[in-house]
Image: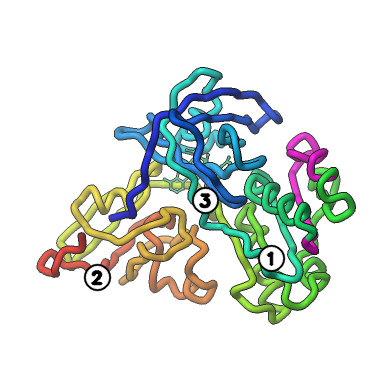
Amino acid sequence: MRFAVHYRQAQVVAARDLSPSVRSIEIMPDGGAAHWSPGSHINLLLPIGDTGEVRSYSLVGEPGGAYRICVKRDDLGRGGSRYMHSLKEGARVTVSDPHNLFELDFQRPHYLMVAGGIGITPISSMAKTLARRGADVTMLYAARTADELLFSDELREAMGERVRFFVSQDGARIDPDAAVSALPPGGELYICGPMGLVDAFRRAWRAAGRPQHLFRTETFGSGGAYAPEPFLVRAPHLGIEVVVPADRSMLDVLEEAGVEVMFDCKRGECGLCAVDVVSAEGAIDHRDVFLSEHEKQSNARMCACVSRVAGGAVTIDTGFTPDAPRLT
Ligand SMILES: Cc1cc2nc3c(=O)[nH]c(=O)nc-3n(C[C@H](O)[C@H](O)[C@H](O)COP(=O)(O)OP(=O)(O)OC[C@H]3O[C@@H](n4cnc5c(N)ncnc54)[C@H](O)[C@@H]3O)c2cc1C
């Protein structure tokens, strides 16, 4: 069960490599591009897997003209980014209109923008928009190597001294505690990057006693603490036992088995698909950002869309019974 998304046919109008692992792709929908605001992403319906799969990409640059996205190649993934890297000018694709789940609030007195790796895609256009409006904004951007730093010239031009770059290969690391304490009270933090970086900022934010609603993040999905492997899911209240293969999610396998589970974001943010864990054999690899650290440690619930079990099985209760009124 998911909210409807409208897709359109579109054409790749430009494609080029920006770095050894990132490809910039410009896409023009038939009938023209829709308006979008910084922080927005588009979904692409890709011909991968048995029935096709959706992958999301944040929009970069300025609204108007073709949609521009930057895709990092992930060779451990299920093929979405590899497919995107194969696209050349003239290719036909199926895209959604832009959605914004990471919208800027222009009313804050101060902003701290933090990007790690490919998490730069939403943050760059958000930070440049704030700088152009004269907002009090600081930006910190970390990448593994210098050639993986994207948009550095345009960010310097738009933000001057207010953007700082950290290349971990050169030993430069962001200090989350120092960054949070340098943000004046009332300031809002927007962060997009690897889970380790987001978690470190979340801890620093909490330790500084900052209000939760001023901590804003968007995740692109997490590789988790363990490599994906098959695991068994038992739902005794439904008389079901299914194996989740390494390349599929528990949510998809449960849905295929006819188990109704509510979901929306499919990336561990909204928590709608969290199921009760009755018992687990092996470690639960919580890959969501919805459950608190305490909830993750207690292993009482797990988000079926992204979380997995390493080395075993899990017994769950979805709260759904076949006799219950069906949700439509
Ligand atoms: C709102 C949003 C915006 C995004 N913006 C961008 C962007 O601007 N640029 C960009 O490059 N990407 C972006 N992404 C990520 C993008 O949608 C894809 O997830 C990414 O391209 C990888 O796709 P894939 O099919 O290659 O890998 P996936 O199959 O999605 O795998 C990604 C990672 O998940 C792990 N994994 C693999 N199989 C499983 C499994 N069965 N269960 C759980 N984990 C598994 C692997 O460790 C792998 O490294 C965004 C995602 C979201 C939600």
Q: Position of residue 219 (x, y in %)?
A: 56, 54
Instruction: Read off the residue under disc 1.
Output: 189
Residue drawn at x 80%, y 55% as measured from the top left = 173
Crowding at mark 1 (Cα within 10 Å: few <14, some 14-19, many 20+): many
Q: Position of residue 246 (x, y in %)?
A: 39, 44
- Residue 79, placed above or below residue 97: above
Of the two numbered discs 3 and 1 in the rendering, the one whose residue sits closer to the viewer: 1
Q: Which residues are magenta?
A: 135-156
Instruction: Read off the residue under disc 3.
Output: 221
Instruction: Read off the residue under disc 2.
Output: 319
Question: Magenta stretch containing residue 146, yes or no?
Answer: yes
Coloring basis for residues: rainbow
Q: Amino acid at mark 1?
A: Leu
- Ligand 1 within 8 A of label 3's CB? yes
Residue drawn at x 51%, y 36% as measured from the top left = 33
Position of 242 compared to 265: left or right?
Answer: left
The local secondary structure at tag 1 comes to: strand
Proximity of marks 2 and 3: CB atoms separated by less than 8 Å: no
Crowding at mark 2 (Cα within 10 Å: few <14, some 14-19, many 20+): few
Proximity of marks 3 and 1: CB atoms separated by less than 8 Å: no
Q: Position of residue 145 (x, y in %)?
A: 77, 39
